[in-house]
Image: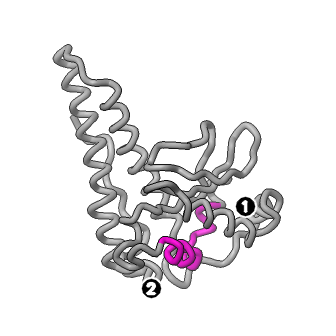
Amino acid sequence: MADVYSLPKLRYGYAELAPYVSELQLTIHHQKHHQAYVSGANSIFERMEKARKEGADYDAKSTLKELSFNVGGHVLHSLFWDNMAPSGQGGGSPGGRLGDAIDKEFGGIERFKKEFAKAAATVEGSGWAALAVEKASGKLLIMQIEKHNTNLYPNSSILLVLDVFEHAYYIDYKNDRAKFIDAVWSIVNWDEAARRLG
């Protein structure tokens, strides 16, 4: 069976997010941690296909939970890389429809950043903060995703996501999650978030 997923290439070099994210931090995060989710998901697909071909059973509860975790890790990381731009090319505030939507929902960019940062800082254990648009209402929502796959809002498209697993920042910021969250605002790629809004 051919691999279902592969590690995406970054749109920038490993050193281009410095000083906010170091070359070493980004390299290990991308090549080791993200690759582990890709490999994990592909391995599970292979095991499931083998079981089906052989008419064998597999433990659905543990297998599907593990698959959800690895697929979620791959998808969220793939979104995360493009939510950052090289130093000097990101940051600032969004304009256009996204800026208007943030102003309408949150009362301005500073209030949004405060709420988003609080969500990121208080994720229980390891996880993510995300800005999403719920498709039925068109409403912007902040998600606090635990692990890679818990507390997701159904029918919502992610516009902006921030990885707050310790593997995202431990080399650069040790255990200071708040300092990492603050630094990311300097390299956030609002153009990509706006493109996802449509």
Q: Which residue is at the front of the view, 2 or 167?
A: 167
In the image: residue 11, left or right of residue 94: left
Residue 90 seen in the current view: no
Q: In which quadrant is the N terminus drawn? A: top left
Three-letter code for the amino acid on which mark 1 is drawn? Leu
What residue is shown at x 40% (from left), y 67% (from top)? 168
- Per the image, is 62 magenta? no
Element type at mark 1: helix
Q: Which residue is at the front of the view, 64 or 91?
A: 64
x, y percent for residue 54: 16, 17
What residue is shown at x 43% (from left), y 83% (from top)? 18
For disc 1, the marked residue is 98
**Tag 2: Cα neighbours inside 10 Å, few (<14), some, or many (≥20)?**
few
Element type at mark 2: loop
In the image: residue 33, left or right of residue 79: left
Three-letter code for the amino acid on which mark 2 is drawn? Pro
Q: Residue furthest left?
A: 54
- Per the image, is 183 magenta? yes
Query: What residue span does the magenta drawing correspond to?
Result: 177-193
For disc 2, the marked residue is 19
In the image: residue 31, left or right of residue 185: left
Q: How is the image coloured?
A: one colour
> Earlier along the polypeptide chain: callout 2 or callout 1?
2
What residue is shown at x 35% (from left), y 27% (from top)? 61
Residue 136 seen in the current view: yes
Please tell me in which quadrant of the rendered image residue 42 appears. Answer: top left
